[in-house]
Image (tube, rainbow, N blue to C red):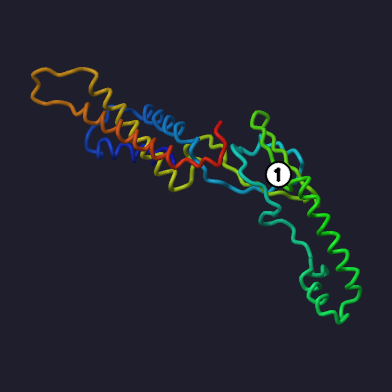
Amino acid sequence: MNREAYIDEIKLALTGFVLESELDDVTYNRILDSAFRQTQRYINTTSLMTLDFSNCIDLSKYHVDVVTNVYRIAGYGSESKDYSTISDPVYLQYYAWLGNGSVSGISNYVSNLGAFNQLLSIRNTTSTDLAFKQDKSQNKLYINVSGNVPDKITIEYIPNYKDIEDVTSSYWTDILVRMAVAIAKITVGRIRTRFGEANAIWAMDGATILQEGKDELEKLRDHLTTNNDLFFPID
């Protein structure tokens, strides 16, 4: 959603496009910025990105907020490799169990495979493959590999959103609309209750809409706190 669509949602809730609003578009945009700021730290929708592998990756140009995982996979469009000449270990081990000598050098292969598996086991106890640490102060990602250094690495991350229009998830768009409407109701309620009316035939609904906005905002904050994904670090 763009900002105009968000503002239309707020105006619909406040005025029904029938009443005249006390707020101008500048104020509506400030309300959107406030809603975005209060919601941003709860957003946990992740994206994938494939980069050239390095033990230290500079994340400053990629708009990454939190790295959640690292994978040895390449993204779409990367070069494919021909694995047709590589023997399947399970296939060769099957022939080793048969013991009919139908595969040349199978005994040496089985011995080497056993030694290699033992080496991997020992190496994994001394160095954790793809263990990573993100230094947010320097925008660096440090990755450890225990062997077989890949050409490419894929990271899963939560983007660092710069504007409310960057949010594309339908769930978080709905949360932002509800947050903005609640803040708008509180703002309008404050305006309408600035002065009291004595002996007036008609009374403004400022107190009602103010309380409405407070209740909705408190309920929404409780929902976000309760459903917050605690796997991600708290900054």
Quarter of the image holding residue 113? bottom right
Residue 130 % position (x, y) = 72, 47
Quadrant assignment for the N terminus: top left
Name the residue located 75 percent from the left edge and 43 percent from the top edge: 144
> Mark 1 highlights which residue?
131
Left or right: where does residue 156 sit relative to residue 119? left
Which residue is rendered at x = 79% and y = 48% of the image?
Answer: 146
Q: Residue 16: which quarter of the image?
A: top left
Between 11 and 47, the one nearer to me in the picture:
47
Q: Is residue 86 left or right of residue 75?
A: right
**Residue 133 versus residue 197 in the image, above or below:** below
The residue at 33%/28% (across/down) is: 24
Q: Residue 200 location, x and y as percent?
A: 9, 21
Residue neighbourhood size for the residue with mark 1, other residues' Cα within 10 Å, grouped as few (<14), some (14–19), many (≥20): few
Give how far across and how far down residue 169 sits, in percent: 47, 47
**What residue is shown at x 21% (from left), y 30% (from top)?**
208
Horizontal and vertical percent for residue 128? 74, 46
Q: Nearest the camera: 134 or 62?
A: 134
Q: Amino acid at mark 1?
A: Ala
SS category of the residue bearing label 1: loop
Which quarter shows the C terminus?
A: top right
Residue 75 falls left or right of residue 44:
right
